[in-house]
Image: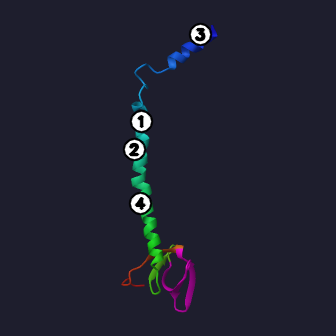
Amino acid sequence: MEVTMFNDIAWAMAPAQGQGADGGSTIMSFLPLILIFVVFYFLLIRPQQKKAKEQKQMLESLKRGDKVVTSGGIYAVIEAVGTTTVTLKIAENVKVKFGKAFIAAIRPASEED
């Protein structure tokens, strides 16, 4: 008697003949997830990659005499450039060594101090 009851439940849970027989409905069920991933790619991932690429190019193009701003907000002029460090002049006779990664931006040469 109990076996028949579980068998009836299994048949009741099974999809009808027309439902789920083809792979089209499976693809349609994943379509919202695919669309969400595409939206995230174009709104979040791609702009982040573009900004990281621009930052890397900016760090590679640093040279002596460039006016820069550090990530801590210090305005300075580059005195020397190493492979991973930069020596910055922040005032007369005051030089500080920073990691290249902490240079946030290059200021235009026309900008006043």
Q: Which amino acid does label 4 sit on?
A: Pro
User: Which one is earlier in the sequence, the residue at label 3 or at label 4?
Assistant: 3
> Does residue 1 appear left or right of residue 75 in this picture?
right
Residue 48: x and y in percent read 44, 61
Tell me how far mark 4 sits from mark 1, CA to CA. 29 Å
Q: Disc 4 vs disc 2: Cβ atoms closer than 8 Å?
A: no
User: Which one is earlier in the sequence, the residue at label 2 or at label 3?
Assistant: 3
**Which structural element holds mark 1?**
helix
Q: Which amino acid does label 2 sit on?
A: Leu
- The residue tagged 3 is 4
Tell me how far mark 2 sits from mark 3, CA to CA. 43 Å
User: Which one is earlier in the sequence, the residue at label 4 or at label 1?
Assistant: 1
Tell me how far mark 3 sits from mark 4, CA to CA. 59 Å
Q: Which mark is residue 47?
A: 4
- The residue tagged 2 is 35
Residue 34: x and y in percent read 42, 43
User: Which one is earlier in the sequence, the residue at label 1 or at label 3?
Assistant: 3
Closer to the camera in the image, 11 or 80: 11
Q: Which mark is residue 27?
A: 1
Closer to the camera in the image, 22 or 67: 22
